[in-house]
Each structure stands twice: as structure tokens, then as C-alpha cells.
Image (spheres, coloured by chain):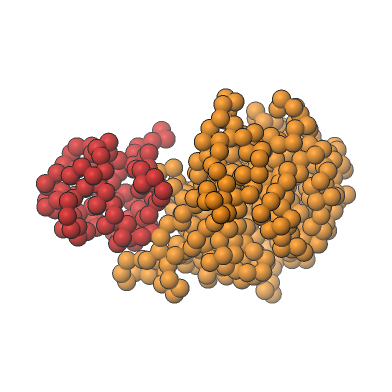
Amino acid sequence: MIRVILPGHLRTLARVSSEVQLEIVGPVTQRSVLDALEAQFPMLRGTIRDHVTQERRPFLRFFACEEDYSLEPADAPLPDAIASGKEPLLIIGAIAGG
Amino acid sequence: MSRVRVLAGTRKGAFVLTSDGKREKWEVSGPHFAGWELYHLKGSPADPNRIYASQCSGWFGQIIQRSDDGGKTWIQPGTPPGEKNAQPAGPPKGESNKFVYDTSAQTGKPLTTHMWYDGTQHPWEFKRVWHLEPSPTDADTVYAGVEDAGLFRSTDGGQNWQELAGLRGHGTGPHWQPGAGGMCLHTVILDPSDPKRIYIAISAAGAFRTDDGGKSWKPINKGLHSQYIPDPNAEVGHCVHHVAMHPSRPGVLFMQKHWDVMRSDSAGDLWKEVSGNLPSDFGFVIDVHAHEPETIYVVPIKSDGEHFPLDGKLRVYRSKSGGNEWEALTKGLPQSNCYVNVLRDAMAVDSLDKCGVYFGTTGGQVYASADAGDNWNPIVSHLPAVLSVEVQTLP
């Protein structure tokens, strides 16, 4: 079971109050996590990555195990602690705007 | 007794303000979508309980929200009918909306480039929905004016959107350029007497009209004179801020341009200036009285470099002659130390007798006049900056 923590505004949009849990079959990567997240919460499509290019939106970052994975390839495996559910994947809104 | 419902979009959420026909006491609901920018909300003339809202964020992009109960609850279109995402049981099934420029061979146009601030060419990029215009006859049909400039239409209540690509692709696109707020399509006017005729306006490209339901478009900027562009009389490139029309006279248009208040009696084919005795002809809003097609309203702003009223006095100007002769309306409005702006979609009228006029400010006030502008009162005074104001007159 993969654990994902969403920014507050996306939790409101998805109507969840805490972290979400996702079942993923196969490699656990940014792409597979986001695919599973959007399948379970289709209202989040387009809010984390662009509808067409599937690129991460510029002001969002992906953190795992205290490391920034935002610039890693979308199909690169995430750490074992994420795949095992020991640690959550954090989707974070960048602190921007002053 | 009739009621009115004012829909205010702000920098940090939406507010729904309701009153009876006297328009003296108001109930305030909100913020809806707290923390998000609400560029525009508008109710369907065909079904007043149907309201569309444009919710967006620099972090999370564009969301379209829809209410089917007059703004009490909201869904993201795509949710199956009857399944509100406001209900607590189970995850919602809605989905975000998708605005993709149509580049298909069948109906689309190649995605070219437009002029950037420095004069170079820049790719077209979807950013947000500025204006939602519901059909006067079908609650499920709604148009969206977007940045970068394009016009989209949904015929299923906002669930799916298709671009009317003839506008973006009609040929002058490479000469369009962003205004300070972006290259936005901010005005959509549907001709109530001719469903195939639509007017739109883009900052800074100008006004355009289709007479065939959106397949083909023509610039309608003849008579506009803009000294800040290389050719002041160019076919496109004018910074049109807003356009208004009275539904009983769909061939008569009123325009607040960057500078200049303009009027066309020929469906936009030719414009003439009607700024007359206005203390400044710079501004953003313009609107028409609900029952008097020659009575129009503007809020003069000092200049393009100083986006606030002249002399710190917030004054609405009214012309009862369709322009040129203007009178200041000040009763109830601050007449000292007022330095707010009134943005392009932040004025509206109701259709009660007497006509109500409403506008919102970047200082968070929404002012209402229940007597066509003679007297004003703030409905609310401390909202986030107001981006848009629309009014529904309810039975």
C-alpha cells in the first residue's frame, strides 16, 4: 500500500482529510503513483501534472524520504520505503509568491 | 417578491450575496473554494439554479465548478448527476476540466505563436478561464474565454470542452499580444436574437465577431485608435478592456478600451468615441442599464500607470444618452482617500424596476445601487480583491 500526502487544497478537492492510500501493481514510480492517484481521484487530473504533456506542474514538488525527487525521471523507481508504505510520498506546493 | 443573487469572484474564493427585491439587507455565503482565485461565476439564464464558476490557482491550474442549486453546493463537472462532491460518503467522482487547443485536422487550427511582450513570438499556452458565458437557452451549453486567448464551448454542463479554433486560427493570431494581465479572452457576448452571432474581446488583440456560430471570425476594430501601438489604427492589437450590449439592441455595442470609451451602432463594424466629458477615459468596466439601452455606466480610472480613481474619489459615471454626456454618481461612494480599482468583469446590473447596479473593487468592497446609480451602499466591505461581479434576478 502506497501512502501519499497531498497539499491542503488538493485534499479539499479530493474530499479527503488525511493521507491517501493506493494499491499499485508493478514498479512504484512517480508515474505509477500519479496514475493510481488520478484513477482513484479523477478530480485531481490536471492539478498535479499537465493534462496533455503529463509534466509536473511547475509549483509542485515530490518529496520522499527527506529527498526531493521532483527532477527524477517519471519512470525511475521510488525508494523502497515508499514502495513498502513505510514512508509517504509528499506532494508539496512550492512556497512561492512572497 | 423578486430576489437578487450577486455572485462575487475574488482572489481568495467566491461569495454569494442574496437579498430580496428591496436590496437593503443582504445575506453573505462564502468563501466557496477558499484560497483559490475565482475569476468568474455566472448563472444560466435558462436555469437560474445552474451556476458555473472558474476556479484556478498558480499551483494547481484550472478547475470548473458547477452548482445546480443556486450556489449552495458545487460539483466539478464530470461527476455523475446526483453525486455531489460535497457529500461525505465515499470519494467524489468528478474530474478536473481539460482545455486543450484544437489542433486536429478536422476542426482545429495549427497551434502557432503570438507576439510576446518583447516583440518576439511565443507559443500558445493555456493558463486559465477568465469568463464563463452560459447560453441564454440551454443550461448545459456554456462558453469559456481563456488565456492564452481562445474560446471554448461545452454542451454537456462543463464536462467536456471543445475549442472554437476558427478564432485563434483565423490569421491575425501572430499579431496578438498579452496585456499586463495576460493574453486573455475576457468578454463573450451571445446575441440573443441570432444564435450564430457571438462577440468576443481579447486583451490585447481587440474585438471579434462570428456570424456562423464560431466557424469563422472577423476583427471588428475599425474606428479604434490606440496611440500605444505601432499602427494606432491597426486591424488588431488594441487593448480592449470590456464590451457590453443591451439584449434588446444586439447591434449596439459599448466598449471600454484601455483608453477611450467607444460605441458601435453597426455590430462592431465601425466604432466612434463617446468619452465626452469623462474626467478620464481609461477604465475597465462598462455596462448597460437593464431597461434603458441608452443608459451606460463606467468607472473612470486615472491612468494605465495609476490604476485607481482620480483624486481618491470613487465615482461611477452614467450617460443617459449612450455616451458623450456623462454625470458623476457619488452618493454613498467614498470621496476621499480611495485608491481601489474596479476590474473588467466586476460590474453588473439586475433587471428589477428600478434597475440595480453593482460593482466590486480590488479593496474587497461590493457596492450596490437599487436606484440605477443614484445612491450606493456597500453590501460587503472586506472581501479579498474582487475579480468579478454578476447578478441574477430571481422570481
Q: Nearer the viewer, residue B3 or A58?
A: A58
Residue drawn at 24 percent across, 55 percent down: A19
Kindly identify the residue that appears in the image at 37 percent across and 39 percent down.
Answer: A59
Q: Is residue B367 shown to the viewer in this render?
A: no
A92 vs A36, nearest the viewer: A36
Quadrant of res B363: top right
Q: Quadrant of residue B182?
A: top right
Whole-percent x, y for residue B143 in the image? 60, 57
Q: Residue at coordinates 53% horizontally, 32% vertically from top-left?
A: B122
Quick check: can you spot residue B66? yes
Q: Position of B150 compared to B210: left or right?
A: left
Q: Position of residue B269 (x, y in %)?
A: 81, 46
Q: In the shown orientation, is residue B57 left or right of residue B4?
A: left
Any idea which chain is the orange one in this picture?
B
User: Quarter of the image containing the C terminus of chain B?
Assistant: bottom right
Quadrant of image for the N terminus of chain B: bottom right
Image coordinates of residue B357 in percent, x first then y, are 72, 55
Q: Is residue B210 above or below residue B88?
A: above
Residue B136, quarter of picture: bottom right
Q: Residue furthest front?
A: B105
- Which chain is red in the rendering? A
- Left or right of A81 on screen, residue A69: right
Q: Is residue B221 above or below residue B56?
A: above
The spot of residue B166 in percent (x, y) is 63, 49
Q: Residue at x 46, y 50 (%)?
A: B62
| Total marks placed | 0
